[in-house]
Amino acid sequence: ICCVWNLASFESLMGAKGDRSTEDGIRIANKHFQQSAGYLEYLRTHLLQYTSLIDNADKNLPTITDDGLTMAKNLMLAQAQLCFYEKAVKDKKVGNMKSVIIAKLAKQTSIFYASASVYCKVGLLGMILDISWFVITDFQSKVFLGAAEYWQANASKEAALASGTGYGEEVARLKRADIHLSQASVSYTHLTLPTNREV
């Protein structure tokens, strides 16, 4: 159990430390985050049942939980999806990506972050986890909802320019993007980062 957990942690660390300024760096980081998510899911589905057999000298120390593993897995999937998003934005700048595809990638990134944020407040995890984990994942979820609306607005604009009609959808989506980003901003202002703990 500990070995698989450490493998997941190592892959997460390698993904976070990767240089995502290049396409190769983005692909490598994505692979590390996906492998981390895979280890966490394997731990949750195949090994979690054995945690009760571990002799824990400190009975007050919480054991690994289904909720905790699910939260961590969704966080890793969000980070992996973020790599896809970053690559798509880079590709868009050189004309090799459609706005509608970037919008879909942003939406899925938001979904993974939202799922992680929900599990930050569930059960035992909600009692012991620093609130900053919830605030940051909730913030990211709202930011990427805004990004999804922004890129869908770009797609609507491209279609409107081609047909000469349909500009209203672009405006509506930009307004929704502004709402999501405003909500993210409000959410983030409530965050007080711990001074002596890593987030």
Image (cartoon, grey):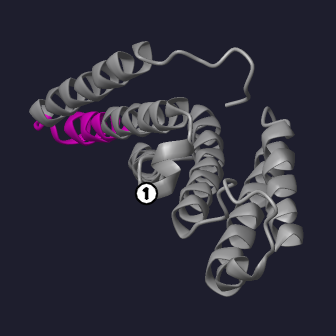
Q: In terms of image quadrants, where is residue 25? A: top right
Instruction: Tell me the residue at 25%/40% (across/down).
Output: 156
- The x and y percentages for residue 77 are 60, 57
Residue at image point 29% right, 24% down: 183
As for residue 163 lying within the magenta part, the answer is: yes
Task: From the top left corner, tell me how far across and down residue 99 is, in percent.
Answer: 42, 43
Q: Which quadrant holds the C terminus?
A: top right
Q: Residue at x 86, y 64 (%)?
A: 7
Label 1 is placed on what type of residue? Gly
Question: Is residue 108 visible to the viewer in this orientation of the structure?
Answer: no
Residue 173: say if magenta. Answer: no
**Residue range corresponding to the magenta coloring:** 151-166
Pick whichever, 125 or 174, lies toward us. 125
Identify the main secondary structure in magenta: helix
Residue 198 in view in this figure: yes
Q: Residue at x 62, y 50 (%)?
A: 84
SS for callout 1: helix
For residue 44, side relative to residue 21 (left or right): left
Q: Which residue is the site of mark 1?
A: 123
- Disc 1: CA contacts within 10 A as few (<14), some (14-19) or many (>=20): few
Please indicate whether residue 111 sits to the left or right of residue 26 in the image: left
Residue 180's x, y, as percent? Answer: 29, 29
Q: Quadrant of the N terminus?
A: bottom right
Res 138 quadrant in image: top left
Which of the 4 image quarters holds residue 73?
Answer: bottom right
